[in-house]
Image (spheres, helix red, strand yellow):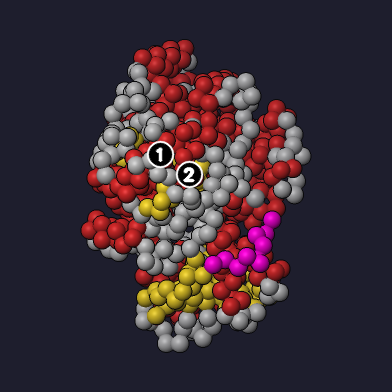
Amino acid sequence: MTNPIFWVGVLTLALIYASLAMALNVESGWGGMWDLGIAGLLASGSYCYVILTAGPDLDMRFAPGLSMWVAWPLAALFTGLVAFAIGAPALRLRREYFLITTLAFAEIIRQLVVIQADFTRGTVGIPNINRPFDSFVSGREYNYVLLAIAAAAAAVMYLVTRQIGVSPFGRTLRAARDNEAVALALGKRVNRMRIQTFVLAGVLIGATAPVYLFYIRAISPQLFAPGITFTVWTALVIGGIGSIRGGLAGAFVLIVFTEAVGLIEVDPAHINILVAIEPFLVGLLLVLVLRFRPDGLFSERTAFGAGGRSNSRARDPRPAEPAATSGG
Amino acid sequence: MKRILIGLLAFGLIAAACSSDDEDEGPVKLGFLNGQSGDYGPWGHWALAAAEVAVEELNAGGGVLGRDVELVVEDNGSTPEGAVSGFAELTEVDGIHALGGIESDGMIAIFETVHELQIPTICSTCGTTELDSTGGDMVFRIIPSDTDNGIVGAQVARDEGYTSVAMLVELSEGTESPANVFKSVFTEQMGGTVTEDVRFNAGETTYAAQVAQAFESGPDAVYIAAGFETGVPLLNEWQRRGYTDIPMIFTTDLLSPEIAEIVGGVDGASAIVGATAYDTESNPAWDAYVPRFEAKIGDPPEIAFYDAWQYDQYIILGLAMAAAGTTDGAAVAAAIPDIANPPGVEVFTYADGVAQLEAGNEIDYHGTTSNLNLNSVGNLLSPVMAVIHVEDGAWDVRENIELDPTLVKPS
């Protein structure tokens, strides 16, 4: 039978991905901005946190050794600034051009981390990330502390994103996504609102970054490959794009399912078959969800009531096409 | 939200109701946490085959402490996140007693947890400079470090009479680390010149610009640090552009048959590798390992696939458990330097080692890759290095060399 500590770790990772998926939902589900740069924003927040908390023993050019409680909000704010720097030019582009631009920015951030080795220790990375309360609780028991931190972070993320979703700002955001021309005709400053949303999502992702590092306990550029972005997106699609609970539910289903598949016991000689079948099974899960629940486990319609989303929009989940743009 | 929280709570309670296995009974479980998929995937098949050969030898030798040995395999997807979750599964679900197979970035991610859970770990493919000074308690490295590889590369360049080199370096931990050491030693300690230092990413569409930049900078030789998957398109570009009269110095990762065929197929071209090597000269451990590995996989061992180190680590772990008389992590870790270092009767197989231990003798295990003597931080005292040339489209080990003791490891 399985030791509960293992499942505590799985739940922790699921909650971290749930937080990221809920942040993604704000910009992509409600804002219609299909962002493939999650890994870049997560890298920005993570490296900001690690650099600010780094001590002189790491031999880095800038290592102020700040308290983690100071560095944590600064990492969130810094990620918001990075999101602004990306969003200002990228949000002038349409649909797939925006999507590919955010993916490119994420890769640029990763390469900057590699190149700026004096500040980031480059490809070698940084081991032994300090974690809150680890002087009080250590070893296996710390997993429960980490679960509590991840749960608290996910709960705050849920409350914040829910508040955004039901606020006038959130309603306007969805309205602009569904029919930008009408929103503009009503005097809404759609472009400004989109940038605000993109920055807000950056802040939320940056706030989640230290929790991810507490789980991994080390940082290196390899950690922020595009795969992490696609995992967050898969979680959101399974849970339901646009719904308040979708990111939370989708991350749980995806991470628990993935880890459960990993528990299948095979002879070592056949491990390559299991390795090959794992992504297939995850893909199959995604296909089945999309086949039988096209809107995901939770739909936007049920989240916001009948008026929450137009029928046409519900059947056509394409990203929004900004009207006042110069094209791409 | 309330329903979700209740569901979470119920899930936690169900999980908590499940009890863990008794780890003091049943087979001795040796974990193999390795990239069977992802970036390290091409090496995975070879690494696993070597680990299986070792575990078969342990079981053929009567098992460990009279118990069968089970190899528990977990794919880490070649990512730090995969290493963390894979290690959690190996320790919390499978209840492993010791760990092997892990690569550098995964090792760094689980380093602290390994110590907290007291899981003796041997790193058979970790070149990372992070382990140059941090191991020795619970983590041991039986492969030369990237620092050793960088120094030997510079040593080869010096011995060949090169005073200037251009560098072509893939941006990854495993290639940048030795390259940075090479550059430091070659320029600061040998007075050499680097005419161009070109860094590039894996998976680029073309390497034409990078190759031209390096080879046209007027060097005596070009130092290339890259994985073999990147090395193939890079050398195809080198061949197309006709830079074949400039000698090349490679790092260990390029010691694959494909690379030798490319270089060997060009008249006048030469490539030399100052590399990590296996200990093949008059070594009974090597002689016993090769036919069993070939029978398992159908190919002979390859240095670039790091298979023999995977074998050695499990023989060491088995002998350490036998010497300690327990699978307790702290006791096994303490026994690892004892069975790897002199004094003691030199042994080359698990069965011989156990026989000597049962006779009340201390042992000094000599593996397939080196004498495996370890220093106080769990690193090799005298790694086996070699000068290897391309000869008729294949790699030819010209001579084994020792690291020049006058060359100082860069700080």
Is B2 located above or below residue B362 in the figure? above
| Residue stretch in magenta | B402-411
Image coordinates of residue A192 in percent, x first then y, are 66, 37
**Disc ID at residue B338:** 2
Residue at image coords 58%, 46% = B376
Is A50 located above or below residue A67 in the figure? below
Q: Do the residues labelled 2 and 1 touch (CB within 8 Å)?
A: yes
Q: Is B290 on the left-hand or right-hand side of B333?
A: left
* Identity, as a three-letter code, of the amino acid under mark 1: Ala
Residue at image coords 49%, 66% = B385
Answer whether residue B383 is magenta in the image.
Answer: no
- Residue A253 appears in the figure: yes
Q: How many labels does the image show?
A: 2
Q: Which of B305 and B169 is in front in this view?
A: B305
Residue at image coords 46%, 54% = B372
Question: Which residue is denoted by mark 1 in the rendering?
Answer: B323
